[in-house]
Image (cartoon, rainbow, N blue to C red):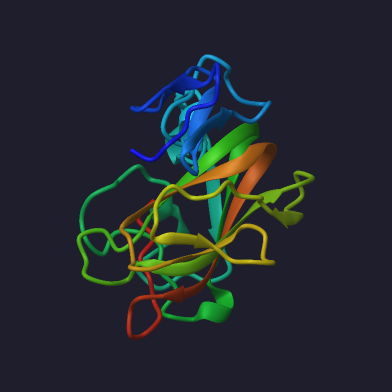
Amino acid sequence: TGCECLAGHGVYPSCVCWPGTYLDAGACVDCPADTDSSSGGQSISDCFSPLLTNVAASSNGASESAAYSQSGFPASAAIDGVLTGSWLGWAFDGNLNVAQWWVTFSAVRTIRSARILSGTDLSDYHVTDFRVLYDTTGSLDWAPIPLATPTNAAVTLVSGATGRVTVSPAQHEIELTFAASVATSGFRLEIFATDAENQNAVITE
């Protein structure tokens, strides 16, 4: 309702966008040039073919590290493939000045999106302000990842801060699509705030 599909882009009024396009601000527009032309749909994330592999999983050869890990909540718990259960994941004792976690892939990978799970089965301990970065050289040289406009209304891009988002209300699962695919050997998460009173979080995966 209220959308306008451009000629050759979709069918009004349902606005089911044709392959190679997606729905943006009420119109079907072209997917980014580096995406799969056979995909498309209701959001920019639909422009990307489904990922066959979670390259950040330890089962796929990834390794992890963190600036600091709380006792009993190691960095490795955020790539172990365990997606359910409370108090399982990486945590940092609420020390936001060292709330940085990163994963090194088994090889250079092309990544197009990221899914972050936090506070699983908890009423708080979710991340609410964070930035995502990628390794530009293979030597842990980090740069922020430009992000596409989020489709989740709770997620907002921080103006003037590439790769940084805020989340309100807090969400257990946050999916981010990048403005363009990135070839990299690593991914980094930097946390600036959470919804817990002590500013801690539990990063499930």
**Residue at x-position 62% and y-position 57%:** 163
**Residue at x-position 59% and y-position 43%:** 178
Q: Is residue 144 above or below residue 95?
A: above
How many marks overall?
0
**Residue at x-position 71% and y-position 48%:** 135
> Residue 71: which quarter of the image?
bottom left
Q: Is residue 37 above or below residue 194?
A: above
Q: Position of residue 58 (x, y in %)?
A: 46, 40
Most extreme residue toward the bottom is 197
Q: Position of residue 66 (x, y in %)?
A: 55, 63
Question: In which quadrant will I find the N terminus?
Answer: top left
Q: Position of residue 192 (x, y in %)?
A: 53, 74
Q: Position of residue 145 (x, y in %)?
A: 66, 51
Which of these two is toward me, 204 or 126? 126
Apparent side of residue 177 relative to residue 74 in the rendered image (left or right): right
Apparent side of residue 93 relative to residue 101 in the rendered image (left or right): left
Which of these two is toward me, 151 or 109? 151
Q: Is residue 2 above or below residue 29?
A: below
Which of these two is toward me, 34 or 121? 34
